[in-house]
Image (tube, rainbow, N blue to C red):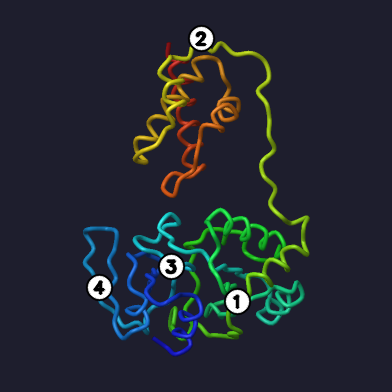
Amino acid sequence: MHETGVKLFNLMFREGENVCVSNSEYAYHSVYLSSAIGDKVKLVSPNPNNEMQEISTDDLTLVALNPITGWRKDEYCTAFRNFLIEMDYGPLPEQLAYAKAIGLPYSAVVFSGNKSLHFLISLDQDLPSEEVWRTMAEWTLAIATAADQNTKNPSRQIRIPGAYRGPGKKQLMVENKGATGLKDFAAWLAQHPNAKPRPPEKRTVSGSRDFSKIKPWVSVRLAAGIVGQKSGRNKEWFAIAVEFAIAGYSEDETILVLEEFFTPDRDFKRKEWLTALKSGHKYANTRKQDA
């Protein structure tokens, strides 16, 4: 790997961690950090029909922001310390000037090899949870309104300097200032209180609903807590949503009532939970129409 790439990895990661790297838009299984910055690295695809490939680390173009053990998915991140702020609009000098104008406390800047600068914030200490990381990521992007607003997940990728993404398109390290102090980052965020993400507003269910039509097993399962494998939880929440729809609850009311019984997990987020509830309502309504 090119020297500037190694320096970026040493800034972002700690000895003994695993990282997800790639030479294309495809995701691969994590590898040891020592392998990623060595001479050769083996890339294993999630598709069993694709053979493992061994390539030179000079050909690696992308690395996931945070350390990962497993496939490149948010739920497999093992630490949370790095953020990406990606500029896509305007000439490169204007992108850099914008970041400086808002006081962005970046650690490094990487030229993508195309039309954008990737600003990395790499903290000097890990955050306690993914939830804290996501709050800070959303807060940062609410301040940096000219940045790409889609870099809100911890397994997002940043370009590796020194590599070529295509003929004549070299990715470059523009600046490497070293780790950003967590206190400095928090102080910068605190200067913009109006941009801080707000928790969803609590709402109450209006009107009365016929609880007698909801089957007893639903109350039993909710009281016990719905845990276990992801596929099982999907099915249970789906079935519960069907019962609520049959009892006369709207989709929004079902979500409001069941919210207090839902606990997000690393492999079952709120987005998946909502999908299960909405699918259950859709299924129940289809059955009503067919009846």
The first of marks 4 and 2 along the sequence is 4
Q: CA distance from mark 1 to mark 2?
A: 59 Å
The N terminus - image quarter: bottom left
Amino acid type shown at disc 1: Leu
Q: CA distance from mark 4 to mark 1?
A: 30 Å
Q: Nearer the viewer, mark 4 or mark 2?
A: 2
Compared to residue 141, the image places residue 41 above or below, namely below
The image position of residue 94, as x and y in percent, is 71, 78
The C terminus - image quarter: top left
Dot 2 alpha-carbon crowd within 10 angstroms: few under 14, some 14 to 19, many 20 or more:
few
* Secondary element type, mark 1: strand
Amino acid type shown at disc 3: Pro
The image position of residue 239, as x and y in percent, is 41, 25
**Residue appearing at x 61%, y 84% in the figure:** 177
The first of marks 4 and 3 along the sequence is 4
The first of marks 4 and 1 along the sequence is 4
Which sits in the foreground, 55 or 135? 135
**Mark linked to residue 67:** 3
The first of marks 1 and 3 along the sequence is 3
Q: Which image quadrant is residue 107 in?
A: bottom right
Dot 3 alpha-carbon crowd within 10 angstroms: few under 14, some 14 to 19, many 20 or more:
many
Left or right: 225 as drawn, with respect to 45: right
Residue tagged by mark 2?
212
* Secondary element type, mark 4: strand
Dot 4 alpha-carbon crowd within 10 angstroms: few under 14, some 14 to 19, many 20 or more:
few
The image position of residue 50, as x and y in percent, is 23, 63
Q: Which image quadrant is residue 208 in?
A: top right
The first of marks 2 and 3 along the sequence is 3
**Residue appearing at x 70%, y 59% in the figure:** 142
What is the count of numbered marks?
Answer: 4
* Secondary element type, mark 3: loop
Residue tagged by mark 1?
117
